[in-house]
Amino acid sequence: MIRRTVALLAAALLLVGGLTGCNAGSGRAANKQLIVAGSTTLLPIAEISAEQYRTRNGGAKVLVSGLGSSAGIEAVAAGTADIGTSSRDLKEEEAGLGLVDTPVAYDGIAVIVNPANPVDGLTSEQLRAIFAGQITDWSQVGGPSKRIQLVNRDEASGTREAFRKIVMDETPFEKHAAVLPGTGQVRDVVSRSESAIGYISLGFVEPRFTSRRVKSLAIDGVTPSDKTVSSGDYPISRTLHFFTKGQPKGLTADFTEFVLSPAIQDRVVVDAGFIPASRQAGAR
């Protein structure tokens, strides 16, 4: 798995390097290169931060790719990335990899349905039963008589791992759910199907580059929002991480500090729909 991940990462970064390398300016950071890889949830923050950092630091080469949280953790552990971005915590078997965690934001995981679906909320028990395949029709939770179309994420997804840990409570996922690799794909499918249900980062609920809409459900009577996530009232929330091999140094430390600065936290993080790392009440 690690060998396959490293190969995919190398291919992605080769493409990014070809696009950005010729544009690198001169200055104190011009000949340095930082590789940031991992979570698709964190990808917009990482990309915008990298662009602003390059502008402020004489064309420093910050190469960003989004192959999933597990891929980012594997890459930083293997030394093929300087920062592994992750929308999930480390698993027990990853605890001994020597990785240092820097939380950069907090996020709620929104459970989404098509706006035409009249169901507005579920209990945690109902949600678990739906994704376990035990509840299979919307009529069982107060909706129309339509078979539920489950939309899940792939096993490399940090969002899936966080959802599994928080919601499923060791209950296996339904094996016949549609499995998609990215947040955008989940959102698109749910926006097009009246019987679908999926889960995505709260920051992606509102449409960005499309007019297609989805509806987030209240869970245990609490609607997901910045306020309910930061207060801890919304039950499905998580920390977004930068992982490094040991304490960050040099360009890695400088970029991490930049991401934690008000320039990124108060604007980019908030604009992306996440909660700044300084609001520790949202930590999980």
Image: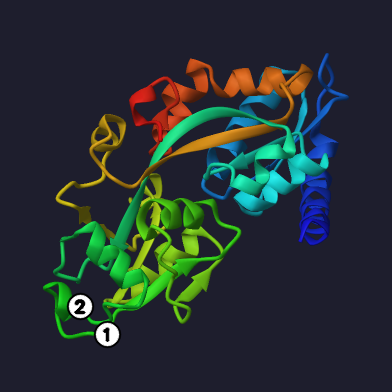
Give x and y (percent) for residue 73.
68, 44
**Drawn side of residue 106 relative to residue 144, left or right:** right
State how far apart marks 1 and 2 are (Cα): 6 Å
Is residue 267 in sight in this rendering? yes
Tell me which corner region of the image, top left, top right, bottom left or bottom right, holds residue 59. Answer: top right
The answer to whether residue 39 is above or below residue 167 is: above
Q: Is residue 192 above or below residue 44?
A: below
Asked if residue 63 shows in the view, the reply is no
Q: Nearer the viewer, residue 192 or 132?
A: 132
Q: Amino acid at mark 2?
A: Trp
Q: Which residue is mark 2?
A: 138
Within 10 angstroms of label 1, few (less than 14), some, or many (20 or more) residues? some
At label 1, the amino acid type is Arg
Is residue 21 placed above or below 158 in the rendered structure? above
Tell me where residue 228 appears, x and y as whole percent: 24, 36
**Picture residue at 20% right of the left edge, 78% below the top:** 138
Label 1 with label 2: CB-CB less than 8 Å: yes
- Residue 283, image x and y in percent? 40, 31
Q: Is residue 242 left or right of residue 262?
A: right
